[in-house]
């Protein structure tokens, strides 16, 4: 009886062992498989990160872009050096594609009452920078309330310091009319300003002012005469580097042709509003593109026989009176 019990116990033990071992192996295999996939997770993340880093490096373009970059073929390495080599190509060096413009004038040239657009001159040179391969870098020395005599002690210093390729002379005339600057003095100063610009190998843009309410009322006769006078001074140089843009008469003609009043274009009696500055810039840009080498402004050497008036010389050939300007 006792022997049978031992045999039965051993049989039960063998059956239990047979059932436990496969279950244990299955559990261990499952555990091993889970650990294997977990261990492959970080490796996969690392590989993905490396791949992303490689992709990011490959897609990052070179920097060092010129104001008007010359577009060329892409470089597979995407290095900064290759970008600089591209923009510094001999056929179009970056430094030759920026033209400095020195602006002299008073409040309208400065862009008063056009806070977002910066005034008709800034609008003009911004438009030219967009329409041509040249970037026009404006150095604005126009100052509200000042007339032609106000820059007598600083003008040459500006020319020496900034070395502009273009000088834009854009006096409005109203400050000088109000201050009763004599015609003779006004003409002499404009003549001297043009002469100094040419001596510094800068091209000259003489721009007559946009019209205002005062152009049709208080200073209707005097401002017209003043603008005509400075045009004659500029024309007297007979120099290929001097360009005249008679915005004053063009803007008047536009208003007459379109049967428009100055009222919607004025901020006050002396200054255009943003709409007035915008119209002035539109007319000026069109005139510049028609007459000025805006895509390649280059100073032209004068013939050796070219004569100059002495500094401050009178330009009475304009036929204007030498006394004070009438109001």
Image (tube, rainbow, N blue to C red):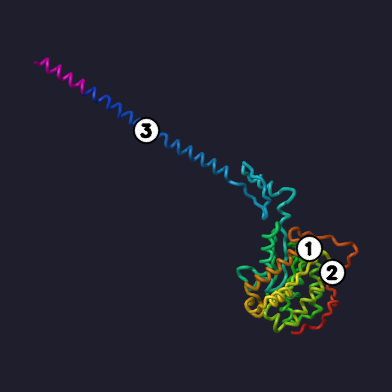
The answer to the question of whether label 3 and label 1 lie on touching residues, with beta carbons closer than 8 A, is no
Residue 66 in picture, x, y percent from top left: 67, 53
Can residue 293 be seen by looking at this rendering? yes
Q: What residue does disc 1 label? A: 202
Q: CA distance from mark 3 to mark 2?
A: 91 Å
Q: Is residue 212 above or below residue 288?
A: below
Counting the numbered discs, the total is 3
Residue ID at (10%, 16%) = 2
Q: Position of residue 275 (x, y in %)?
A: 63, 72
State which tag comes first along the sequence, 3 or 1: 3
* Neighbours of disc 1 within 10 Å: few (<14), some (14-19), many (20+): many
In the displayed structure, 185 sits above or below 84; it is below
Q: Quadrant of residue 278?
A: bottom right
Stretch in magenta = 1-15
Is residue 9 rendered magenta in the image? yes
- Foreground of the two, 224 or 112: 224
**Label 3: which residue?**
35
């Amino acid at each position: 009886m006792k022997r049978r019990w031992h045999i039965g116990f051993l049989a039960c033990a063998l059956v239990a062992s047979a059932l436990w071992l496969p279950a244990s192996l299955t559990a261990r295999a499952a555990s091993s498989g889970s650990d294997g996939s977990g261990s492959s997770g970080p490796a996969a993340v690392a590989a993905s990160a490396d791949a992303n880093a490689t992709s990011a490096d490959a897609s990052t373009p070179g920097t060092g872009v010129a104001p008007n970059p010359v577009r060329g073929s892409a470089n597979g390495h995407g290095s900064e050096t290759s970008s600089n080599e591209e923009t510094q190509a001999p056929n179009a060096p970056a430094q030759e594609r920026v033209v400095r413009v020195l602006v002299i004038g008073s409040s309208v040239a400065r862009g008063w009452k056009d806070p977002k657009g910066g005034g008709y001159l800034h609008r003009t040179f911004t438009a030219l920078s967009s329409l041509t391969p040249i970037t026009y870098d404006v150095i604005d020395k126009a100052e509200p309330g000042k007339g032609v005599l106000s820059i007598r002690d600083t003008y040459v210093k500006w020319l020496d310091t900034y070395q502009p390729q273009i000088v834009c002379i854009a006096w409005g005339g109203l400050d000088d009319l109000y201050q009763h600057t004599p015609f003779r003095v006004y003409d002499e100063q404009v003549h001297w300003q043009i002469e100094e610009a040419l001596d510094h190998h800068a091209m000259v843009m003489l721009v007559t002012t946009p019209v205002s309410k005062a152009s049709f009322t208080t200073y209707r006769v005097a401002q017209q005469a003043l603008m005509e006078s400075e045009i004659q001074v500029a024309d007297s140089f007979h120099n290929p580097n001097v360009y005249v843009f008679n915005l004053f008469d063009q803007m008047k003609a536009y208003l007459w042709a379109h049967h428009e009043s100055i009222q919607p274009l004025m901020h006050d009696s002396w200054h255009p509003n943003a709409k007035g500055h915008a119209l002035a810039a539109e007319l000026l840009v069109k005139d510049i593109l028609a007459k000025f080498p805006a895509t390649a402004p280059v100073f032209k050497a004068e013939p050796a026989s070219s004569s100059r008036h002495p500094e401050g010389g009178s330009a009475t050939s304009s036929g204007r009176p030498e006394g004070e300007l009438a109001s």
